[in-house]
Image (spheres, rainbow, N blue to C red):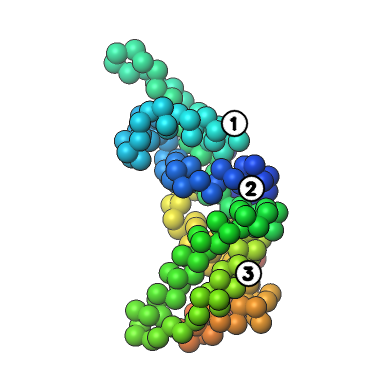
Amino acid sequence: MARRAVQVVSQVEVARLLVDPVKRQILRHLGEKQLTQKMLGELLGMADPSVYYHLKELRAARLVRVVRSEAEAHGIIQKFYEADAQYFVVDYGAVPLELRRHLLAVNLERLRGVFAIKALKGARVTLSSVEMEKVADRMAYFVSEAARRYQALPASGDRESLIVNLYGDAILRAIEADPAGMEPLTSQLSALGLTNSRRGSARRRSLSS
């Protein structure tokens, strides 16, 4: 079965796995290329038993699969793993508050990356922590919505480019659908000349075609 570009996770127990930092790192690496348990251990600086434990849970949740096996020179069979999708997005509205709090931190970091562009241009960013959290919380819902469209796409190209495009689509969708709730972000992006409704609509049409 061909891999998807994005998989949206709605099951709470599976979503719990995705807030674990080690499992997120494993999925990041396996979303980029096929690796053995030993290779993952070297990348993560972890012992084989620990990597095996995380892989076992990810396989049980159908987030990771074995794609091939190869025999080494000394006869040991090495299994190569890959993630079932290049990127996983938790359905923000389907999980309890405790999980949304963990996910909020990720969305805050991504938003800070957007605002860092403005700071690099010499402009001062004046959003408060409360405003940042509010925008990040709203953004999380629109990331889930945008991700559903990407589920129909096969895995291809670079994983990081996929994530950037996904979040870019989610930002445009959020600004168009909820201008009041996204006002702080809209103001910042408008000042940079980065908002363009027609471009966002065209991008969404290309995804649905």
Circle 1 residues within 10 Å: few <14, some 14–19, many ≥20: few
Q: Secondary structure at mark 2?
A: strand
* Image quadrant occupied by the C terminus: bottom right
Q: Secondary structure at mark 1?
A: helix
Question: Of callouts 2 and 3, which one flags the residue occurring earlier in the amino acid sequence?
Answer: 2
Residue for point 50% across, 60% down: 106
Could you give the CA–CA distance between mark 3 and mark 1, rounded to whole angstroms? 31 Å
Q: Whole-percent x and y of residue 105?
A: 51, 61
Question: Of callouts 3 and 1, which one flags the residue occurring earlier in the amino acid sequence?
Answer: 1
Where on the picture, by quarter, is residue 48?
top left
Residue for point 46% across, 65% down: 109
Residue, disc 2: 9
Circle 2 residues within 10 Å: few <14, some 14–19, many ≥20: many
Q: Whole-percent x and y of residue 94?
A: 70, 54
Could you give the CA–CA distance between mark 2 and mark 3, rounded to whole angstroms? 18 Å
Q: Amino acid at mark 3?
A: Arg
* Image quadrant occupied by the N terminus: top right
Residue for point 68% across, 75% down: 177
Residue, disc 1: 60
Position of 38 relative to 168 (above/below): above
Is residue 31 in view from this perspective?
no
Q: In the displayed orientation, state which residue is furthest to the front.
A: 98
Q: Amino acid at mark 1?
A: Ala
Residue, disc 3: 138
Position of 32 relative to 144 (above/below): above
* Dots 3, 1 in contact, CB < 8 A: no
Position of 8 relative to 45 (above/below): below
Q: Whole-percent x and y of residue 138?
A: 63, 69
